[in-house]
Every structure is written in C-alpha cells, then in structure tokens.
Amino acid sequence: MDIQYVYTKKRNQLGRPTNFSDRPAEILAEIIPNLNLLQEFIYRDPVEIGVQNSIQLSEHEVNTIRYNTESKGINHTEGGWPKDVNIQEQDQINRFRKKIEKDEFYLNSLYRLIHDLEIDIKQNNAIDIHQIYFQNKIDDYDEPFNIKTINLYTYNSNINQMANHISWQPDGQRKIAVSYCNFDFNPIIMNTIDSLVWDIENPNKPELILKPNSSLSTVEFNQKDTYQILAGCLNGQVCIFDLRKGNTPVEQSLIEYSHRETVRNALWLQSKTGTEFFSAAADGKIYWWDTKKMNQPVDKLVLDLEKKERSQYASAITKLDYDSSIPTKFMVGTEAGRIVLCTRKAKIDTERINVIYPGHSGPIYSIQRHPFFHKTFLSIGDWTLRIWSEEIRDDYIFSTKPSKYYLTDAQWCPGRPGVFISSTTEGSIHVWDLLFKQDQPALTVKLSEEAIACLSFQEQGRYIACGTKNGNVTLMELSDSLCILDRNEKQLVATMFDRETRRTHLLETRSRFKHDKQIRTITLRSEEELNEEISQSTEQFWSIINKEKKKLQDYLKQFEQELNLKEN
C-alpha cells in the first residue's frame, strides 16, 4: 500500500525561483605531490591492534549529604491521662486515681508487676548494678555564669513610661504582655497609657496594643484560656482582655464596686472553670471576682492588721503572691513593710490573717514562694533581699548584704532551686547562686541607665524579661549553668534551708529566754533597788551632759579669742 502526503503551498511562500543549467567542470584547488615527503615514510610491519568485544564501563563515586543523628532520652514520670481529666486540677486527678484503684484489672496488674519487681530487687541486692564508682567527683560547670541580651522591645508612644509588670503567655511562651503605668503623680501626664503585647521574635512592632479606659498597673495571662489577659487599672477597676476579640476590654468591673486606689496586683486563682481571680490595691482591700459576674466582687477581705474592724485602719497593699499548689493560702506585702500570710478558708476577716512577719523597713515590692520548697519564700522591701520560712515567724533565715541602691524586684529561677535574680534602681541585675557563694552575687549585669522596675521568668527558666522605668523591655537568655538543674542540687539546697531554719529557731529561742530572764529579774527586785538604780542612771546621764556642755563652752571661748587676735 502506497502512503503519500501532498504538501500544498502558495507560490509566494516558496521564495525566489531556481534556474538549473549545465556547465563544464572547473578546478578549484590543486595539490602537487612532494617526493621529499615520500622518503620520510616508514612502513609498520607487523601491525598489532587489540580488539575488545565486551562493553566498556566507567566507575563513578557519589557521596550523599551526611545525616546527623542525635541520641535523646525521655524521663517519663506520669502515665497518659484521659481527655476529660484536667491534670492542672488536683481534685480531678485524685478522683480518677481513686476510681482506678478500685478496678479489679488494676489490682491484678499491680499484683503481677509486684511479683516481677520483687525478683529484680532480689537480683539487685545480690549484685549492685547501680554502683557509683566516682562518688567524690565534683561536677564542674560546662560554662561560666553568663547572661546575653536577645532582644530589646521599644515603642515610641511609651517612651519614658514605666514598664511595671510583665506576664508570659503559658502556651508556647512566645508572647509577653507588658503593662505601662506612671505611679508618680503629675497632672500634666495623667493621660491613659497604652499597654502592649509583644511577640518575642519580633521586637520591631508590638503584636497588639491594648486600649484600656485607665492605665494598666498589672497584667496576667490566664493559665487555662491563654488568650485572656487579666488587668488591674490605675483608677481601681479590673478588666479582662481577649486577644481574639480586639484590643479593648471585653469585661470590666463597675467603678462604684471597684477599688478606691490603684490596683497593685491581680492574679488568677486555681479553679475548675478558670474564671476566678482576686485583686489587691492600696486601699487595703482584697476582692475576689468571677469573670462571669463582673458587676461586683464575689468576696472581699479588709487587711486590718490591728483588728479594729474598721476600713480606715486597713494597711495599704503593695504586692500579692499566690501559688496554685497551695490553693487556700496567699501572701500579702504591705506599704508598711510587713508580710502577711492569709487563708481563704475562714469566714471572718480576723481569722483569715494567720501570720504577720516583720518584713522590711520599706514597702514590699516583691514576694514569691520557692517553686521547689513551698514553705520558703523571698521578699524585697528595702536595700536587702530576705528569705523566710513559714516555721519561723519573728526572723528571716537568710539576708543579703545591704545594697548601695534600692532593690525593686526579685524572682526565683524555675530551673535551679539555688538561683534567684534581683534588680536595683541603678539599672543592674544581680544573679545569686546560694551553692556557689552567699555573701555576694555570682554575676552582676549592668542593663540600663534607668531603674529596673520588674522581672519575669519564662516557665522553663531559660529566658527572663526585664522592664525599665523609661519603658524599655529587655529579653535575656541565661547560660546552662544558671538554668539547668545539677545532680543533688535540690537535696543540697533543701539541707541548707533546713539548717538555717534550725539555726534561726535556736537563736530566736535563746533571745526569748534572755528576755524572759531579764523580766523575771526586774520583777524580783524591790522598789528601793529600782529607785536607786534609776537615780544612779539619772546622775550618770546629767554628768555626761554637763561635761559635754563645759567642752562646748571652752571651745567657744577659744574661738572668740582667736577671732579677736585676727582682728587686732
């Protein structure tokens, strides 16, 4: 079968027509033979040529990108929990445990595991597989104490406005909320100051600008709903912000049922719903609130330390501290320098005030329970930082040397039990390590020319945020030697606190015994002996006064004589 295809084109598409014609051949180039080259020609006899019938192959080497591997261990301390059990609620955990412990399957599994465990224990008693070969070895730090600055957060509208409180977002720890407020009374600058929410990885622009009705004096993220922010205002109100619903308060207390002074602290409470919180202000009152009912407080406490049952005798509150692991107790710092341990179990205000500690010689600016040992807490109130124990009511167990500058804030490190950080009005932060040295800071960092107003640790203890009086917020990273727990460190710090507690208790008992002994000796004396001792003390006092008076008169006479000589 013939296959053909006809191409059809127009004549104008074929170009210029060709005209073929015949013509004779012509020589274009001619090379004449050279006989001299023929003499240089060599014949190859014989000629050997190798022939390979197989396929020629080439070999190549290729090295792929190296795959880096890393070994990591996991310390699994608790099992998995069902979705309906909130591990933050101790009551739900206890109910679930009681329910499981009554199950027959649990008892049978436990019996089987105990049998296997008993065999392993007997083997371990025969041969100690966990023997420590280097018991006297001292762990050295991988690196020296070090703090480096990560970011500096500055907003033009809030320059020279004090950043007085910082709160970290619980979920992910990527955001910080900063409240800006000026406590110095100045009628010229009493306008409302905006507060900010920053993303720690973006220091150029705040993620959200909070627009309150009054300047915020404190902010706190909700532990359960991480988009909610609790805030206390300069005019005494408390309000709730929701990052999902804009930059204005979604809930706010009524002014007539709010505090009469500036709210100094507002903290979320441990509850099933996550909607309860309490606030304290300089008017000496503590209010308990519920976000579902913000028109008026649920409960209140008037901090009347003199127990005169009058609100005008209430002590001004400067600081609150609440630990969710002890949900019924909280601590209060007053403007007079006292530290008050309170409980919410009692119904009467006088019964809610449990213990009053002597505190400091100035207003309390910081109180915080130890994250590892809940009976120990620190406080800041003057030029010293003091560590207290709930077992000792009349004295502290540890105190730093008086600083040259006033202390403004202090925080325990969440990663290491023996480390805490304090800040000063000079603009420096002092890092203390009780296991390294106790008489002076292990590290001092000059952070700003202005006073540092507040500190706030990240939950893991790796990062710390510092707010200054001029409105700057600095994020710093701690070295591994300051935030990673060493072997036996928790036990060593606990032993040190117990030793200091016993020492302080012994000194307190001894001083009380001496005081009682002096009182008994005074009461045993007769009235004539007391009168004679008083008369001797009086004569001794006036004799000293007369001697000093005579010295002063002699000095004045000598001075007048010298003046007369100079005039002459």
Image: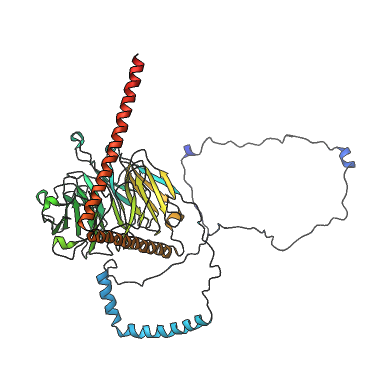
In the displayed structure, 35 sits above or below 67; it is: above
- Front residue (pair 489, 360): 360
Q: In percent of the image, x 47 and y 64: which residue is there?
A: 72
- Front residue (pair 358, 30): 358
Q: Please tell me in which quadrant of the rendered image residue 567 appears.
A: top left
- Front residue (pair 53, 17): 53
Asked if residue 331 shows in the view, the reply is: yes
Q: Residue furthest left?
A: 256
- Front residue (pair 306, 457): 306
Task: Give the percent coordinates (x, y) of residue 303.
Answer: 17, 55
Task: Give the percent coordinates (x, y) of residue 532.
Answer: 24, 51
On screen, residue 270 versus residue 492, left or right, reads left
On screen, residue 269 versus residue 453, left or right, reads left
On screen, residue 29 versus residue 339, left or right, reads right
Give the total number of marks visible in the rendering: 0
Q: Please tell me in which quadrant of the rendered image residue 192 appears.
A: top left
Q: Which colouring convention does the figure follow?
A: rainbow
* Picture quarter with the C terminus: top left
In the displayed structure, 524 sits above or below 336; it is: below
Asked if residue 372 shows in the view, the reply is: no
Task: Give the percent coordinates (x, y) of residue 124.
Answer: 50, 80
In the displayed structure, 374 sits above or below 111; it is: above
Q: Residue furthest top?
A: 568
Task: Give the percent coordinates (x, y) of residue 411.
Answer: 34, 53
